Amino acid sequence: MMDYHLHPNYSIDAEGSIESFCKMAIQGGLQEIAFTTHLDTDSSTDDCFVNVKGRRVSTRSNLWLEEYESEVRTADDTYKDQGLRVRLGVEVDYIPEMDGALPERFYATDFDLILGSTHLIDHIAISASDRAEHAFSRYTAPELGEKYYTLLLEAIETELFDILAHLDLYRRFGQIFYGEEIHEIWKPHLKTIVQAMKKHNVGFEINTSPLRRKQTQPMPEENIVRALKEFGITVVTIGSDAHSPADVGAGIHQASALLKRVGYTHIFHFEARKAIKRPIW
Ligand SMILES: [Zn+2]
Ligand SMILES: [Zn+2]
């Protein structure tokens, strides 16, 4: 069992040390986890920081990355004898102007996995309850779809990412704003997205965080997962997007059941950014 989307307290909106996440993973019977600290890139927002030992450090600085890498590798050494592998990942927020927003050391870091996310539309976080509406009020549902999936396509084409995180993130708060129409906006765009995913070797994750927000569907929702399967996308991971140790592994059984229901038989682990195929548990 895996959980490939975890935010320890390096992320400014998360709590709990790497060690405490690992202990919870072992208690929950997981065999492999990946830490995926946020790397926000839009300097016009207040989010471009990480915490390192109680200090706030710019995401552009090399300081945190060195510390983070060494702490995750130490955790892997410590816990592998107890049956838990710990992978080094990061969740990068894609924006078109992100050149120069990554720390220099980013390219020299031996990540196992890089998640690509699009959290922002017009510099507004659609993942935040207090800000999302501000972005949505500018667009009809189909316009939002056009905007979001154009951004996602650009993100894929950078070839920076292994996995697309929470592919239909706009649904989290968009469902309240737009109603049922929000479930349709991916339809005109998915074929183009899939072609780019195949060309640039990018997979997707089943993100279980909506299941902790009283929603019945993970991200992406089942209809999209089914379409991705039909279009031949094979590389898929599962992640809880936990921001505290208590949520490690949350919803991963529902996610594996969903994957099996739509016909997936395998899941992928990552090591040094190579996708490794394993049967779904
Ligand atoms: Zn995210
Ligand atoms: Zn995340």
Image (cartoon, rainbow, N blue to C red):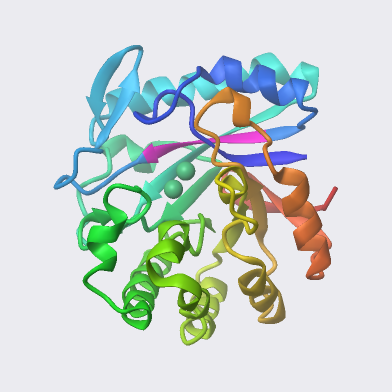
Residue 121 seen in the current view: no
In the rendering, at what x and y percent does residue 93 appear?
Answer: 35, 51
Residue 24 seen in the current view: yes
Horizontal side of 240 relative to 26 (left or right) equals: left
- State whether residue 237 is above or below residue 96: above
> Start and end of the magenta stretch?
33-38
Among the 4 quarters of the image, the one containing residue 86: top right
In the rendering, at what x and y percent does residue 76 appear?
Answer: 64, 23
User: Residue at coordinates 38% horizontally, 48% vertically from top-left?
Assistant: 92
User: Residue at coordinates 43% horizontally, 28% vertically from top-left?
Assistant: 14
Q: Mainly helix, strand or loop, the magenta region?
A: strand
In the rendering, at what x and y percent does residue 205 appear?
Answer: 60, 56
Q: Residue furthest left?
A: 44
Report the front residue among 120 and 116. Answer: 120
- State whether residue 213 is above or below residue 178: above
Report the front residue among 127 and 129. Answer: 129
Report the front residue among 105 and 87. Answer: 87
Horizontal side of 38 relative to 245 (left or right) equals: left
Among the 4 quarters of the image, the one containing residue 38: top left
In the rendering, at what x and y percent does residue 60 appear?
Answer: 23, 36
Among the 4 quarters of the image, the one containing residue 148: bottom left
